[in-house]
Image (cartoon, rainbow, N blue to C red):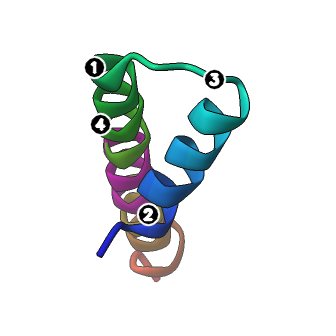
């Protein structure tokens, strides 16, 4: 089963008739990495803001 972001990227690429599978894979990897970094930032922000009382 496709992850929601992967499904969304594939839908957008189909909409614009993009046929490059490598582009799809690269975009999925970029968004996945961005999501992971965002999660890490949230944890760090929480620790710095709420964990140092």
Given residues 14 and 30, the one toward you in this image is: 14
Looking at the image, which is closer to me, 43 or 4?
Answer: 4
Disc 2 packing (10 Å; few <14; some 14–19; many ≥20): few
Disc 3 secondary structure class: loop
For disc 4, the marked residue is 29
Give the class, few, some or many, for how many residues have Cα within 10 Å of label 1's Cα (few <14, many ≥20): few
- Residue 16 image point, x, y percent: 71, 24
Question: What separation in Å lies between label 3 and label 4 (alpha carbons)?
Answer: 20 Å
Alpha carbons under labels 2 and 4: distance apart = 28 Å
- Residue occupied by mark 3: 17
Q: Earlier in the sequence, mark 2 or mark 1?
A: 1
Residues 30 and 23: in front is 23
The residue lying at 61 percent from left, 36 percent from top is 14
Residue at figure coordinates x 29%, y 76% from the top left: 1
Q: Which span is picked out in magenta?
A: 33-40
Tag nearer the camera, 3 or 4? 3
Camera-near label (2 vs 4) is: 4
Instruction: Looking at this view, name the residue that lies furthest to the right.
Output: 15
Q: Are marks 2 and 4 in contact (CB under 8 Å)?
A: no
Residue beneath disc 1: 22
Q: Position of residue 6 (x, y in %)?
A: 43, 53
Q: In the image, what residue occupies the spot 54% across and 43% down?
A: 9
Q: Using the rendered view, name the quadrant where residue 24 is placed.
A: top left
How packed is label 3: few (under 14 Cα within 10 Å), some, or many (20 or more)? few
**Disc 4 on helix, strand or loop?**
helix
Residue 48, labelled with which disc?
A: 2
Task: Report, in whole angstroms, how far the alpha carbon at label 1 lies from the one at label 4.
Answer: 10 Å
- Pointer 3 and pointer 4: residues touching (CB < 8 Å)? no
Would residue 12 be found to the left or right of residue 23 on screen? right
């Amino acid at each position: 089963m496709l992850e929601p972001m992967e499904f969304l990227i594939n839908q957008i690429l189909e909409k614009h008739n993009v046929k490059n599978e490598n582009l799809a894979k690269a975009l999925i990897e970029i968004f996945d990495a961005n999501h992971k970094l965002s999660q890490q930032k949230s944890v760090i922000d929480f620790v710095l803001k709420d964990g140092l009382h």
